[in-house]
Image (cartoon, rainbow, N blue to C red):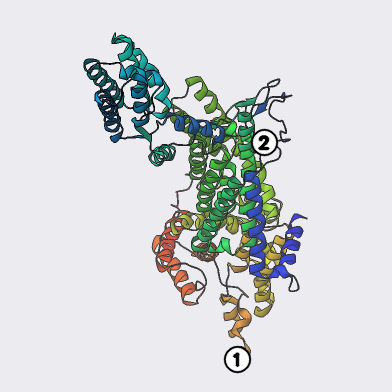
Amino acid sequence: MISMNNYKLRDFFMQPNSVYSRLVVRRIVLGLAFFLLFTVSLSAEFISDKVSLAVGEVSDRDIVAPRTVSYTDSIKTKKLEEKVVNSIANVYDLDLGAAANAEENIANVFKITRNILVDKANVNDEQKADKLQKELAVSVPSAVVTALIHLDEQDLTKAEEQAKTISRKYFQRGIREDDLDLVKSQVIADIDQLKLNKNVATIVGGITQPLLRANFVLNVRETENRKKAALASLDPVQETVKKGQVLVSKGDHVTAEQIKMMEELGLYKGQANEKRILGITVFVLLVMLVTLGYLYRFARPVYDNDLQLVLIGSILFMSLWIGKCAHSLNSLNYDFVAPIAAGALLTAILIEARLGILISIILALFISIITEHDIRAVCCVLIGSMIGIYSLSKKDHGHSLTRTGIWIAAINFLVIASTGLIEQIDGMEILKEGGLGILSGIISAVITTGLLPYLENAFNITTAIKLLDLAKPNHPLLQRLLLDAPGTYHHSVLVGNLAETAAERIGADPVVVRVGAYYHDIGKIKRPYFFVENQEGMENPHDKIAPSLSTLIITSHIKDGLELSRDYKIPKIIMDIIAQHHGTTLVSYFYKRATENEHSECIVEADFRYEGPAPQTKEAALIMLADSCEAAVRSISKPNVNRIEATVRKIIREKLNEGQFDNCNLTLKDLDVIGDVFIRVLSSMFHTRIEYPDGIK
């Protein structure tokens, strides 16, 4: 039923009237589908609902960060900026002319006073005071004017000197606008400390205070420039929220900073982080383009196969969600328990090991996004998956997933332990995480074992494991071969041993070769006694029929074998070997018999040839040679190394000259290696036994 569904799926895509029959359309549809799946999966978070709390409200539950995120805290940054701006002192420029102008005004006051005092026209104090008040350029209190006209020259000189001294003192210190009132009050205190007489003290204070003014002028432009420079050199306040951190505890009043954290995590009122989604979108697009580019350049058969592309996408999608499910568990670092290696193992087994390595790298890249760039989790996924692929071996006639799971578990533990020591993590925590890594390796092997049969059937893929099931002697079709055609069964086993020995030497698949050899003559079940290996002690039925009919019977075992294979659901790769293992070779024995008859001129050679096609793969060509060489050497009356070698070399040469290897990628060097292996193995199988004397065994 599954196989029929597969054909229906392919027929749907390939129908002439279907828009999906066009390669470009199919690729665009598949590419967009997986692009959306990957992007949405990496962007979506495991959050049941969004938080809609306002500042000051009481939280009804604990709100926990689902992932680690770093962000700029605008609130704290603004406060820091205000603090820095307030800490920048204002820039003032010194007015050098203020002090000189004040001293000049003081000197003018006393000069005018002396002139009025010596003027004879001023006969009384009232006239002197009025004239002084009018001529003074500085506005002074009337008490100061009165005191001035009552001083003698000595006191005038003393008052002038003290006024200049005090004025000079404060101008040299510098007077700011906001400090002017304070300076004037300090002038009174300084005058009191001088112990001057009342009139002199009144004059010094009354003249000095009005003349004091700010000589430090605020430089607005320079001050603003310094504030701007300070702000430009200021780094924004960065906050980091760790995965599993409690943002708001149940019963707490929510603050603006907590709401900011929830917004950055996308937890607040359904807010989506547009920048994160955009970044993931571009990242996924780049990864997909690089992957397709690799397939196009280095794995073109996979690139041209829609089902295998869908298989790769499905494995990536499945592994991606396994990683997300593990990451959503916050109680421990469950990233290490995710059996991500299963995706790489499935790809290596179902397609090829090099693509398994590629999938390992892609999954590590995706996991880096899920785990917020946790280098330890990325290393665990990448190294564990690659070691798992390395441990897969076909030399054992299959993939030992139990051994692979153990290797992944051991490597996961070492990676977790070593990276934990680098980051100086607590020893007990490393052991806990290492235990999760061991569990990940075991689960990866279990998942791979469980999913393999379903993926094989769903995507019409034949793996070594499936082939090894066919090679078991208890397979119903092999049981029929053993019971109905025991000679053919024995011949097939010998051909399998012979071909498998040479397979690895020339880069062919030994599992395909062995299983193909077991089933290559399965069609002989229909008419077993028409084949010489099954005629032990029987009369040869071909002696009584025409050579043309004998040829038809002999060549029909190919067609019969294909029909039986379809009935027993034998994989296509084995059916191809059945169809190709004789190629288009001539049934020479019966052709020769036919040409020896009376009407030999009417004989058409093509009627005595197999329909073919010629071998298309190394495996089919290898079985062709092993089949012919085993049968030919078995027919030698007294076999020895020289006769066996001559027979093997002759058969290989004849097949090559007939063009049977034109469509497979066998090289002359491969043929030479095959000949050497066959000669060695056949010599050990068909050596001449020593004849023992009677009574000795």
* Mark 1: amino acid: Glu
Q: Which mark is residue 511?
A: none
Q: Nearer the viewer, residue 602 or 154?
A: 154
Give residue 526's quadrant in the image. Answer: bottom right
676 versus 263 height, above or below? below
Q: Dot 1: within a 10 Å radius of its alpha carbon, few (fewer than 14), some, or many (20 or more) residues?
A: few
Does residue 609 sit above or below 627 in this rendering? below
- The quarter of the image holding the N terminus is bottom right
Residue 210 in the image: above or below residue 195: below
Q: Amino acid at mark 2?
A: Leu
28 left or right, relative to 396: right
Q: Residue at x 63, y 64 (%)?
A: 27
- Marks 2 and 1 sit apart, C-alpha to C-alpha, by 91 Å
Q: Residue at x 51, y 61 (%)?
A: 293
Query: For residue 114, which quarter of the picture?
Result: top left
Q: Is residue 144 left or right of residue 502?
A: left
Count of numbered circles on the image: 2
Q: Position of residue 504 (x, y in %)?
A: 46, 55
Residue 650, percent from left and from top: 44, 71
Residue at x 43%, y 58% (from the top left corner): 677
Q: Which residue is mark 2?
A: 267
Q: Position of residue 448 (x, y in %)?
A: 62, 42
Q: Give me the disc on residue 601.
A: 1
Counting residues from the start of the chain, the first of labels 2 and 1 encountered is: 2
Residue 297 position (above or below residue 176): below
Which of the two residues, 449 or 602, is positioned nearer the viewer here?
A: 449
